[in-house]
Amino acid sequence: MDLGPHAAFIWLSYAAVTVTVIGLIMWLIADGWRQRADLDALERQGVKRRSSN
Amino acid sequence: MQTLTQRLANPTRFMELSARLLPWISWATVILLVYGLYLAFLASPADYQQGETVRIMYIHVPCAWLSMMIYGLIALSSFGLLVFRHPLADVSAKAAAPLGAAFTFLALLTGSLWGKPMWGTYWVWDARLTSVLLLFFLYLGLIALRSALEDEGAAAKLTAVLALVGVSLLPIIKFSVDWWNTLHQPSTDFTSTVDPSMRLPLLIMALAFTLMFFAMHLKAMRNEILRRRVKALRAQAVAGRDRFGASAAQGAAE
Amino acid sequence: MKSFWALILRDLRLAVREGGAIGTALGFFLVVVSLMPLGLGPDLNLLARIAAGVLWIALLLAALLSLNRIFEADYEDGTLDVLATGPLPLELVSAAKALAHWITTGIPLAVLAPILGILLNLDLNAYPILVATTLLGTPAVSFLGAVGAALTMKTRRGGLLLALIVLPLYVPTLIFGISAVSAGAGPGGLGASFLILAAISLVTVVLGPVAAAAALRVQLQ
């Protein structure tokens, strides 16, 4: 694929978007895991939510 | 619509529904993104004016679109919080703010990477670039205000007030930047009508990015609900322990 | 209405008795304006061209310094709680405090601006217009600032946060304040920018207190 004289700019912008998007997704997934783990740990300690889940 | 938002008011129901919805949205995003990238790189010609650089547009325009749409969503959520006291409104606003800042940043970055070959410089004080920069500042203000307040209920309402102030001033800011730009330089018009060969890839990419945002937003909202549950449970656990050892604690306090 | 004026009078009296705050804002204004030629070089033609912009930006920064004063002291000593339970609606309380801030900070800065214009070789014809635009634009500065001050009232690093929140909102005031001066100095007369600046001030004077009161209510519960 020949992107002409400005190929570096095109690749750089796609790379920046890719890195940011993947970073966001990884952060979201890791954050989800952490909250899940915390919630499970609390429930194992016997702390229950008063409202039914 | 009203009934849907009302039914979603229960966080538990929202968790169930979003868990079912999230995989579908994610896969649709992936399919659209692959198709959009195929169109953007392989199945569309170079622009007669911009050359190959036009391919940056296929990610720049969706990011710019998201930067505005997300602010609109935050404003709508803020309205939902302040007027209807919808329990998920603040979760939505809080989850959307960093995502909006990220896409606004990407819009600025890709815009300046497009500007270097086109305009010969990374940054031009073009009316649209300047407005997006100011929008980015508004996002930063929202995030900073929320992080500076400890009480979560107060933080939710105060950031909602700020978001509504921002959204009501946004048209004036946009108008004044346009005015300022025409005052200082002849308008550089690169916005010739979109060529039909560009329209389809742009549309598909915009759709893909919008779906991607909604997937991220749902996930972030789920995380936030879990975070609040953890917090509530911890507070409950501490309260229970206090009641258990109340006499000892009281003795120590007095 | 009587308590509205009483509140303004009280704030004015407090500002005069303390004195320091106004002096600090004016001194800051002076120092920022005199730093500009030191940074940009003493070329009088260049300075004349950018004078209006420099004066407006320095004025905004100087006003920013005193914004957190609008609500903070009254919040800390409990006056605000009393006012909240009083007969005057919080919207009018915010309006009164913003108005007092404009009288004690906006007007002195607007009066000082043309004097500092001498330092920047500002065109003599522009003087009356500069005073007019700064007087017309500073209400927007005070009333938008009151919103920011109400939002950041309880935060500890309030000053910087306040600047981050409020400065982007000042952009329309800045742009039309400067363009009124440059349009007014030319042959075209005052032009539309003067009227738009007035419109912006009016909008913020009406909407600012509503938003500020909403923010206060959240924190005074």
Image (cartoon, coloured by chain):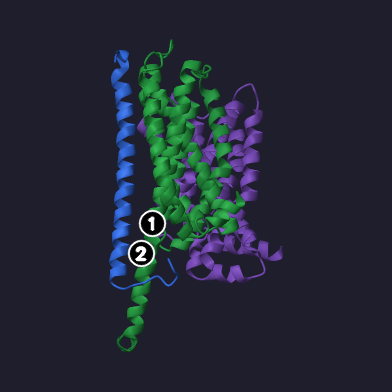
Chain colours: A blue, B green, C purple
Q: Amino acid under label 1?
A: Arg
Give the image location of residue C122, x and y in percent: 52, 30
Give the image location of residue B116, x and y in percent: 36, 21
Q: Residue furthest right?
A: C1
Task: From the image, tell me which residue sits under label 2.
Answer: B230
Quadrant in which the N terminus of chain C is drawn: bottom right
Q: Residue at x 34, y 75 (%)?
A: B238
Is residue C17 visible from the viewing direction of this image? no
Q: Residue at x 40, y 70 (%)?
A: A49
Which chain letter matches label 1?
A: C
Image position of B174 with respect to C140: above or below: above
Between B214 and C132, the one lying in front of the other is: B214
Label 1 secondary element? loop
Task: From the image, tell me which residue sits under label 1.
Answer: C157
Q: Quadrant of residue C82?
A: bottom right
Which chain letter matches label 2?
A: B
Q: Residue at x 41, y 46 (%)?
A: B22
Between A22 and C115, the one lying in front of the other is: A22
Q: Amino acid under label 2?
A: Val
Give the image location of residue C216, x and y in percent: 54, 61
Q: Residues within 10 Å of mark 1 (few under 14, many from 20)?
A: few
Between B122 and B219, the one lying in front of the other is: B219
Q: Residues within 10 Å of mark 2 (few under 14, many from 20)?
A: many
| Left or right: where A30 falls relative to C165 | left
Give the image location of residue B129, x and y in percent: 45, 29
Q: Residue furthest top?
A: B48
CA–CA distance in space, label 2 to label 1: 28 Å
Quadrant in which the C terminus of chain C is drawn: bottom right
Residue mark closest to the camera, 2 vs 1: 2
